[in-house]
Image: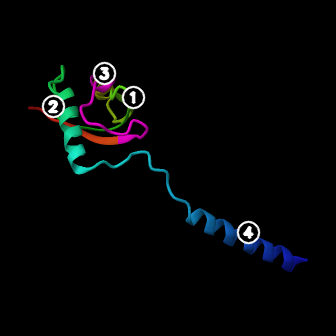
Amino acid sequence: MKTIKIALLVVAIAFTSTVSASTDPIKTETSISKVESIEVAKAISHLLDKPAFSIENELKAYVIFTLNKENEIVVLTVKTEDVVIENFIKSRLNYNKLNVKLNPAKRYGVPITIKEE
């Protein structure tokens, strides 16, 4: 009886480690072509140009967005430690038209760096 329990335990452990090792992580951001990424970077840079606050240090954030049917940016999350930067990015990007045609059903990620001019 003990050997059956031990054998079942060994099989269960082997099965669970195999299953967990073969899972694929879910990708939330979709890569875009180099030409599209340059155009997206230019458009976002233009929208975030000339903030109304002073910048002492280089500020970094990571924005995850999608597009709606009208090709407008919908900001999903802004990963940053500064709430002011998060609100600034959301207010400047949300519902502004993007002149690059991307798939509206997918999510896109963009790193953003704001520097003093």
Going from the N terminus, do you reach mark 4 or mark 3 first?
Answer: 4
Give the residue type at disc 1: Asn
Mark positioned earlier in the residue sequence (2 or 1): 2
Drawn side of residue 17 relative to residue 69, left or right? right
Q: Give the spatial CA distance, label 4 vs label 1.
A: 46 Å
Residue at 44% across / 45% down in the picture? Answer: 28
Q: Is residue 58 shown to the viewer in this render?
A: no
Q: Nearer the viewer, residue 76 or 56?
A: 76
Relative to 74, residue 38 above or below: below
Horizontal and vertical percent for residue 51? Answer: 18, 23
For label 3, the residue is: 91
| Marks 4 and 1 in Cβ contact (< 8 Å) | no
Q: Which residues are magenta?
A: 92-108
Which of pointers 4 and 2 lies earlier in the amino acid sequence?
A: 4
Which residue is labeled 2 in the image?
56
Q: Farthest top residue? A: 52
Q: Residue at x 51, y 58 (%)?
A: 24
Task: Kindly report the distance in space between the C-alpha atoms of the residues bearing marks 4 and 3.
Answer: 51 Å
Kind of residue at disc 2: Glu
Name the mark on residue 68.
Answer: 1
Q: Nearer the viewer, mark 4 or mark 2?
A: 4
Mark 3 and mark 1 lie on one chain; the one further toward the N terminus is: 1
